[in-house]
Image (tube, helix red, strand yellow):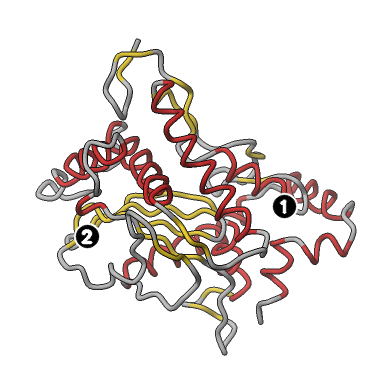
Amino acid sequence: MSKCSLCSCEAELELSHILPKFLFRYQKKSSPTGNIRSVVNPNRIVQDGEKVQFLCGECEDLFSRWETSFANNIFYPYEKGEKSEFSYDSDLSKFLASLSFRCLKLSYVENRLGYIENSLISYVPKALNNLSRYLLGEIPHPNEQRQHMILLDTAHSSSGYIDGIKESEFNLYTTRAIEYDVVASDIVIFVYIKFLKFLVLCPVYTKTQKGWRSSRINHQSAVLKPCSIELNDYVLHRMFDGARRMVASRTDISDKQQSIIKSNLAKQQPENLVSSPIGRAILSSKL
């Protein structure tokens, strides 16, 4: 018996996904080769996302309901190009808060946040308390931890480069990458969650609200659609860093694994390669 990371009850804990399983299942299914690889170890085919003993069965079921709502009503329709405008209710804010809570909580309890200044680290447990109380229905609003979401797609530049990154490489990151991070400086701490064509942000500490308004998700109901969003430089820099790491990881792929990738691609019908999300991201780019 251990303590549930959300409700703190003593219980047999479930093996919980930190980022939902359906994200990786879709990423794998929509890949031309049917395989996915991590940036950390690109020579190993990944079957699933990170899993840990994290939640009791009751809290796992709670999160699962919000995941299903998001997957069916927003994720699949947007990824498949069926819809680009979505009316949403409180389930969206709850789902995003559950993601932010999982990523921040795991990073905190596993001592991954040693880079945060001592004067600011106290904001992390405060944020976790707000998120957990909101998710458990103890408060109606997540307070300073309001959730933010941006619908992503391919980007374009007249030069064919975006912050020195080839347009096609940046677009592969914005439309296909899955990762999370807790980003920190002396003026901000925020949870950064990037999955396929979605970017989720959750402020933990901010010195100013500048750049934290246009992407905000209403905790009750509103409409979500692609639009011009004001993003702070530190968010953009994290995106650029993520794209650069993705590009750099390819140099670590062994000759054997490169041969396997080429062999798998050669087995695919050309029209399937072109129509795949990866093919569309590359073909829509200048370079």
- Taking the image as shown, residue 87 lies to the left or right of residue 206, namely right
**45 displayed left or right of 224:** right
Give the image location of residue 263, x and y in percent: 85, 50
Q: Give the x, y percent position of residue 156.
A: 57, 81
Query: Residue at horizontal 55%, vertical 80%?
Result: 161
Could you classify mark 1 by the number of other residues whose Cα lies within 10 Å: few (under 14), some (14-19), or many (20 or more)?
Answer: some
Which residue has dot 1 on it?
31
Residue type pointed to by label 2: Val
Farthest residue, direction bottom: 158
Counting every numbered tag in the picture gives: 2
Q: Residue 23 in the image: state x and y as whole percent.
A: 58, 45
Which residue corresponds to the image point at 59% horizontal and 48% vertical from the top-left? Answer: 72
Find out whether the residues at labels 1 and 2 contact each other: C-beta distance under 8 Å: no
From the viewer's perspective, is residue 140 above or below residue 186? above
Q: Earlier in the sequence, mark 1 or mark 2?
A: 1
> Which label number is shown at residue 188?
2
Tell me the residue at 74%/51% (across/down): 258
Towards the viewer: 267 or 98 = 98
